[in-house]
Image (cartoon, rainbow, N blue to C red):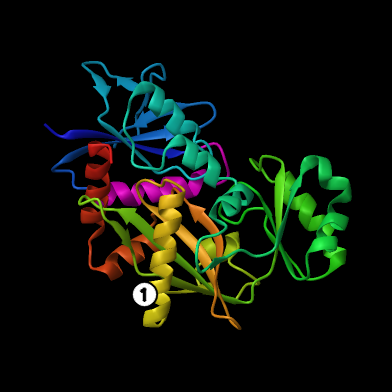
């Protein structure tokens, strides 16, 4: 009997389209000899199982089952491939926890916490060899006085970003004080931000992204890093999803000491945040000091054919089929 997997995708934010692409790639790589995959598409108005022929069957949200004409599908596991809310902010995980359904991602608390970039930085402060850019966390009540609060503490240039959300939506690099208020307003007005904005001093350095997961033996595995080089001002939404704007090098050209240092830092981040499943951690290597600066952690990293994690899995010598199978088995064991 095959294990029944609900592959949950879609979502409530502008990242829904990327979620659908990630889920389609994952579905194409999972071993269907072992697992029966049921794509579950979630939106604000509809939760449905979408069959291979496009037919939609409503999900019974009272118990997360799918009633069909001849059976009711009960799931053994949820494979969460939903970027943004409700898949990356803990809401979906909390719902599944109440129903006793296992899933592949971090738990509800870690997911909710890591969605808040400022709070995440506070928890990670003090990890040896990991540094944080100077920053100011702004709340909606600060909007009128925001520029004064920022300029009092930080030095140009700045990164202004929503304190929640992903795909660099609502993010701006600010090089002059005249542009600061507009950037702050853009970030506050982006969807699903929690009405908080994080302003950070710019770190001049190379940008990297690296996956971490726990394998079936219980060991933390750090995948090879990807270096991101873009012709844009920074790795924004356009750079992430427009072909030709970004060069991604996997494995990244780091020396042995840097690779070892990064792996130690990333494992400590994973443990300190009580992560589960696969995560992706983004960081800078500052040019002048050779120090690693934390950017953010993604608890539901992208899984399209060209996304970082599949690149890193292949560079590590695994197939995506073996990798996703291991994530499923670890989640089924409750580890």
Asked whether the viewer can see residue 333, the reply is yes
122 or 25: nearer the eye?
122
For the point 51% across and 35% down, the residue is 86
Q: Secondary structure at mark 1?
A: loop
For the point 48% across and 26% down, the residue is 46
For the point 39% across and 59% down, the residue is 267
In the image, residue 248 lies at what x, y percent?
Answer: 45, 73
Magenta residues? 11-29
319 or 194: nearer the eye?
194
In the picture provided, is 210 more to the left or to the right than 172?
left
For the point 32% across and 21% down, the residue is 65
In the picture provided, is 52 more to the left or to the right than 121?
left
Q: Is residue 185 above or below residue 65?
A: below
| Residue 178, magenta (yes or no) | no
151 or 87: nearer the eye?
151
In the image, residue 87 lies at what x, y percent?
Answer: 47, 39
According to the picture, the residue beneath numbered tag 1 turns out to be: 251
Give the quadrant of residue 237: bottom right
In the image, residue 221 lies at what x, y percent?
Answer: 30, 60
Q: Is residue 323 above or below residue 133?
A: above
């Amino acid at each position: 009997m095959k294990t029944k997997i609900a592959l949950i995708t879609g979502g409530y934010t502008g990242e829904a389209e990327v979620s659908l692409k990630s889920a389609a790639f994952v579905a194409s790589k999972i071993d269907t000899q072992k697992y029966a995959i049921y794509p579950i598409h979630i939106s604000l108005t509809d939760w449905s199982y979408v069959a291979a022929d496009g037919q939609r069957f409503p999900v019974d949200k009272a118990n997360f089952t799918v009633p069909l004409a001849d059976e009711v599908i009960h799931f053994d596991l949820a494979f969460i491939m939903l970027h943004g809310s409700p898949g990356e902010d803990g809401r979906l995980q909390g719902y599944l926890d109440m129903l006793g359904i296992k899933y592949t991602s971090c738990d509800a608390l870690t997911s909710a916490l890591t969605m808040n970039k400022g709070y995440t930085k506070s928890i990670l402060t003090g990890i040896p060899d990991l540094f944080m850019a100077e920053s100011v966390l702004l709340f909606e009540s600060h909007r009128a006085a925001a520029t004064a609060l920022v300029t009092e503490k930080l030095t140009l240039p700045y990164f202004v970003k929503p304190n929640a959300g992903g795909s660099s939506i609502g993010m701006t690099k600010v090089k002059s004080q005249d542009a600061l208020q507009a950037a702050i307003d853009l970030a506050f007005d982006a969807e699903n931000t929690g009405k908080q904005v994080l302003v950070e001093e710019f770190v001049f350095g190379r940008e990297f992204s690296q996956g971490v997961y726990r394998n079936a033996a219980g060991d933390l595995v750090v995948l090879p890093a990807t270096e991101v080089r873009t012709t844009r001002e920074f790795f924004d939404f356009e750079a992430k999803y427009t072909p030709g704007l970004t060069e991604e090098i996997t494995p990244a050209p780091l020396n042995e000491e840097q690779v070892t240092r990064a792996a130690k830092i990333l494992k400590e981040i994973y443990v300190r945040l009580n992560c589960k499943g696969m995560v992706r951690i983004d960081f800078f290597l500052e040019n002048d000091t050779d120090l690693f600066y934390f950017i953010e952690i993604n608890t539901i990293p992208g899984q399209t054919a060209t996304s970082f994690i599949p690149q890193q899995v292949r560079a590590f010598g695994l197939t995506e089929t073996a990798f996703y199978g291991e994530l499923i088995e670890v989640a089924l064991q409750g580890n």
